Image (spheres, rainbow, N blue to C red):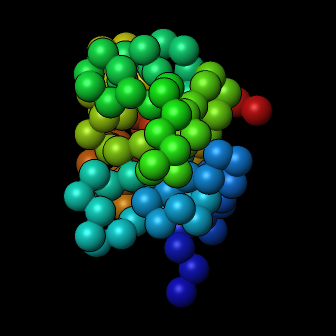
Amino acid sequence: MTERNVLGTELATCSEDPLTGYGRDGCCRHFPNDAGRHEICAVMTEEFLRYSKSRGNDLITPRPELEFPGLEAGDRWCLCLDRWLEAEAADAAPPVVLEATAEEALERVRLETLEAHAHEE
Protein backbone atom coordinates (compact mmCIF):
# COMPACT_ATOMS: atom_id res chain seq x y z
CA MET A 1 0.00 0.00 0.00
CA THR A 2 1.31 3.43 -0.96
CA GLU A 3 2.00 5.87 1.85
CA ARG A 4 0.03 9.07 1.53
CA ASN A 5 0.72 12.70 2.27
CA VAL A 6 -1.61 15.26 3.85
CA LEU A 7 -3.09 15.98 0.41
CA GLY A 8 -4.09 12.33 -0.04
CA THR A 9 -1.57 11.65 -2.79
CA GLU A 10 1.61 9.56 -2.77
CA LEU A 11 4.13 10.66 -0.13
CA ALA A 12 7.06 12.47 -1.77
CA THR A 13 10.66 12.42 -0.56
CA CYS A 14 11.51 15.29 1.78
CA SER A 15 15.31 15.33 1.48
CA GLU A 16 18.20 13.06 0.63
CA ASP A 17 20.83 15.80 1.13
CA PRO A 18 20.83 16.13 4.04
CA LEU A 19 19.36 12.68 4.52
CA THR A 20 16.32 13.02 6.77
CA GLY A 21 13.50 10.97 8.25
CA TYR A 22 13.19 8.83 11.34
CA GLY A 23 14.25 5.86 9.20
CA ARG A 24 16.91 7.99 7.44
CA ASP A 25 15.35 7.17 4.09
CA GLY A 26 14.59 10.75 3.01
CA CYS A 27 10.88 10.53 3.87
CA CYS A 28 8.78 11.90 6.71
CA ARG A 29 6.93 8.64 7.25
CA HIS A 30 4.82 7.54 10.19
CA PHE A 31 6.60 4.96 12.36
CA PRO A 32 4.61 3.54 15.30
CA ASN A 33 7.80 3.41 17.42
CA ASP A 34 8.76 7.05 16.70
CA ALA A 35 7.73 8.86 19.87
CA GLY A 36 8.67 12.22 18.31
CA ARG A 37 6.53 11.65 15.22
CA HIS A 38 8.93 13.10 12.64
CA GLU A 39 6.13 13.48 10.07
CA ILE A 40 6.30 17.11 8.93
CA CYS A 41 8.62 17.98 6.07
CA ALA A 42 9.72 21.57 6.64
CA VAL A 43 12.08 23.98 4.94
CA MET A 44 14.44 25.35 7.55
CA THR A 45 14.58 29.07 8.20
CA GLU A 46 17.11 31.02 10.27
CA GLU A 47 14.27 32.01 12.58
CA PHE A 48 13.16 28.41 13.19
CA LEU A 49 16.71 27.12 13.65
CA ARG A 50 17.37 29.80 16.29
CA TYR A 51 13.99 29.07 17.93
CA SER A 52 14.64 25.32 18.05
CA LYS A 53 18.10 25.86 19.54
CA SER A 54 16.60 28.16 22.20
CA ARG A 55 14.22 25.33 23.11
CA GLY A 56 17.09 22.87 23.61
CA ASN A 57 17.12 21.21 20.19
CA ASP A 58 20.22 22.44 18.35
CA LEU A 59 19.74 21.55 14.69
CA ILE A 60 22.58 23.83 13.56
CA THR A 61 25.65 22.18 15.08
CA PRO A 62 26.95 19.09 13.24
CA ARG A 63 27.02 15.89 15.32
CA PRO A 64 29.20 13.42 13.36
CA GLU A 65 28.80 10.75 16.06
CA LEU A 66 25.06 10.75 15.25
CA GLU A 67 25.63 11.12 11.50
CA PHE A 68 23.96 14.52 11.73
CA PRO A 69 25.44 17.16 9.40
CA GLY A 70 23.84 20.21 11.00
CA LEU A 71 21.20 22.21 9.16
CA GLU A 72 21.07 25.61 7.55
CA ALA A 73 18.32 27.76 6.14
CA GLY A 74 16.87 26.20 2.99
CA ASP A 75 17.49 22.59 4.05
CA ARG A 76 14.48 20.30 4.21
CA TRP A 77 14.08 18.23 7.36
CA CYS A 78 11.49 15.95 8.98
CA LEU A 79 10.33 17.71 12.13
CA CYS A 80 8.57 16.40 15.21
CA LEU A 81 4.90 17.28 15.26
CA ASP A 82 5.08 18.80 18.74
CA ARG A 83 8.12 20.99 17.91
CA TRP A 84 6.45 22.29 14.75
CA LEU A 85 3.21 23.02 16.64
CA GLU A 86 5.17 24.75 19.39
CA ALA A 87 6.99 26.88 16.80
CA GLU A 88 3.70 27.66 15.06
CA ALA A 89 2.24 28.94 18.32
CA ALA A 90 5.34 31.15 18.72
CA ASP A 91 5.10 32.48 15.14
CA ALA A 92 8.36 30.73 14.24
CA ALA A 93 7.08 27.72 12.26
CA PRO A 94 9.05 26.91 9.13
CA PRO A 95 7.24 26.38 5.81
CA VAL A 96 5.80 22.90 5.22
CA VAL A 97 6.22 20.77 2.09
CA LEU A 98 2.71 19.32 1.97
CA GLU A 99 3.54 16.65 -0.64
CA ALA A 100 6.25 15.25 1.66
CA THR A 101 4.35 15.47 4.97
CA ALA A 102 2.85 12.18 6.20
CA GLU A 103 -0.94 11.87 6.17
CA GLU A 104 -0.78 10.78 9.83
CA ALA A 105 0.26 14.32 10.78
CA LEU A 106 -3.41 15.22 10.32
CA GLU A 107 -4.14 13.36 13.56
CA ARG A 108 -2.53 16.30 15.40
CA VAL A 109 -2.47 19.23 12.95
CA ARG A 110 -5.35 20.57 10.87
CA LEU A 111 -4.82 20.61 7.12
CA GLU A 112 -5.82 24.28 7.06
CA THR A 113 -3.01 25.08 9.50
CA LEU A 114 -0.47 23.23 7.36
CA GLU A 115 -1.78 24.89 4.19
CA ALA A 116 -1.38 28.31 5.82
CA HIS A 117 2.34 27.46 6.18
CA ALA A 118 2.76 25.72 2.81
CA HIS A 119 6.16 26.11 1.18
CA GLU A 120 6.03 27.78 -2.20
CA GLU A 121 8.65 26.58 -4.67
The residue lying at 54 percent from left, 15 percent from top is: 46
Quadrant into which the C terminus falls: top right
- Whether 112 is drawn above or below 15: the answer is above
The residue at 69%/54% (across/down) is 16
* Residue 28 shows in the view: no
18, 48: nearer the viewer: 18
Q: How many marks?
A: 0
Q: Nearer the viewer, residue 38 or 23?
A: 23
Could you say where residue 55 lies in the image, as x and y percent from the top left? 26, 22
| Furthest-front residue in this view | 65
Give the left or right position of residue 115, taking residue 113 as reference.
right
Residue 29 versus residue 90 in the image, above or below = below
Q: Residue at x 32, y 30 (%)?
A: 57
Q: Using residue 57 as the reference point, say whether residue 26 is left or right of it.
A: right
Residue 76 placement, left or right of 89: right
Identify the residue shown where x is 45% and y is 49%. Answer: 65
Q: Give the image location of residue 4, x and y in percent.
A: 53, 68
Q: Taking 54 as reference, is 78 left or right? A: right
- Asked if one can make out residue 4 in the rendered structure from this viewpoint, the answer is yes
Question: In the image, is residue 3 above or below residue 51?
Answer: below
Q: Position of residue 11 (x, y in %)?
A: 60, 64
Q: Residue furthest bottom?
A: 1
